[in-house]
Amino acid sequence: MIIFLNILFGVIAGVFSGLGMGGGTLLIPLLTIFLGYEQKLCQGINLISFLVMALISLIIHHKNGYLCMKNIFYIILPGVVFSAGGALLAGFLPSNVLRIGFGVFLCILSIFEFYKAVKK
């Protein structure tokens, strides 16, 4: 049953990620709430799945000619530096702090999305 739920949650996160919503916004709560995994493990799983999805998206966008290679290093360099820094920081923080931080992030994100929807 656990294997089935892991696969199901992965498919759900992948579908929502493909629709433009970050898969991690669903994957992390599903894994922590329903399967009881530790927050750090869930965030690590999310990062690994994100790398795979981002690589596939990058290949598709490149084939369709949607990539602008000019000044790309101004985006890549800070992204790599801050991703590595965030990963190191997350390794030192307790799971409760990560869980609270992720919850606050989701609440702020929902407020912004609600505001955008009402404004339209």
Image (cartoon, grey):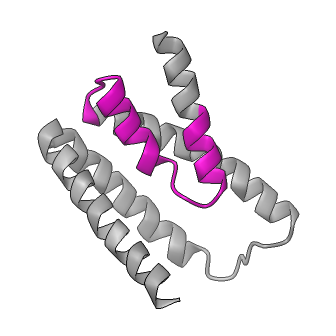
Q: Residue at x 38, y 31 (%)?
A: 31
84 in relation to 91, above or below: below
Is 71 situated left or right of 98 in this image?
right
The image shows residue 117 at horizontal and vertical percentages of 48, 80
The image shows residue 42 at horizontal and vertical percentages of 36, 34
Is 109 situated left or right of 12 in this image?
left
User: Outermost residue toward the top?
Assistant: 1
The image shows residue 52 at horizontal and vertical percentages of 62, 42
Q: Quadrant of residue 107?
A: bottom left
Q: Residue at x 52, y 78 (%)?
A: 74
Q: Decide which of 32, 47 is in the foreground and name it.
A: 32
Is 89 situated left or right of 32 in this image?
left
Q: Quadrant of residue 61?
A: bottom right
- Let me know if residue 24 is in the magenta part: yes
Q: Residue at x 13, y 46 (%)?
A: 97
User: Outermost residue toward the front?
Assistant: 118
Which residue range is magenta in the image?
A: 11-39
Is 62 situated left or right of 94 in this image?
right
> Chief secondary structure of the magenta span?
helix
96 in relation to 82, above or below: above
Q: Decide which of 112, 90 is in the foreground and name it.
A: 112
